[in-house]
Image (cartoon, rainbow, N blue to C red):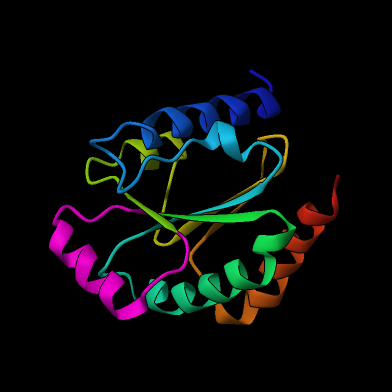
Amino acid sequence: MQPAKASKIALLALGVLLSTPSFAQAHLDLQGLHGHVVYVDFWASWCTPCRQSFPWMKALESAYRSQGLSVIAVNLDHDRQDAERFLETFQPNFAVVFDPAGALAQRFKVLGMPTSVLIDREGRVRYQHVGFLVSQRAEYERQVRSLLAEK
């Protein structure tokens, strides 16, 4: 299977799972995000680098939402209360969904925490990062800006 086709299939699978009411905090239809750049971040409450990435993602969402960026954080905690405590501390301004069974993590082959996947306006996975390095924030943002610049 070609990488672009596999990426589109993964995005469609994400859309199906996110639109299932028992899975998502709120109904999310990724078909409605076609034409947006989507930053999907897999995280858990116990993940130390996630404590650094959440404030950055919050700023990223604020800075680029009007240009077509959508941030979606996918929580992998088995205990929803752990995730809720984390969210209470960081108060994200972006969508959060819960994946305690790890179905999405398996589909995106998440190898470490956090893992972020950057999807272009056509639904193709263009970048994937395992971990979050403060020293790489400028590079992550450059990648977001480059995808936003593509029309």
Q: Name the residue: 42% across, 70% down.
A: 92
How many numbered markers are drawn? 0
Across and down, in percent, residue 128 comes to 59, 51
Residue extent of the magenta highlight: 74-94
Residue 5 is drawn in which quadrant? top right
On the picture, is 40 further left or further right than 43?
right
Residue at figure coordinates x 48%, y 65% from the top left: 131
Q: Nearer the viewer, residue 55 or 49?
A: 55
Seen at 38% across and 43% down, the residue is 105
Query: Quarter-wise, where is residue 107 in the image?
Result: top left
Residue 41, how many percent across, how many down? Answer: 47, 56
In the image, is 23 to the left or to the right of 79?
A: right
Q: Is residue 85 left or right of residue 91?
A: left
Residue 75 location (% of width, % of height) = 32, 55
Q: Above or below — where is 58 with respect to 16?
A: below
Tell me the residue at 27%/75% (across/down).
88
Above or below for 104 versus 25: above
- In the image, is residue 89 above or below residue 75? below
In the image, is residue 85 above or below residue 128?
below
Point out the image quarter for the N terminus: top right
Quadrant into which the C terminus falls: top right
**Is 65 left or right of 115, judged from the image as shown?**
right
Magenta stretch: residue 82 in it? yes
Q: Nearer the viewer, residue 140 or 92?
A: 92
Residue 143: x percent and y percent? Answer: 74, 60
Is residue 92 located in the magenta-colored stretch of the structure? yes
Q: Residue furthest top?
A: 1
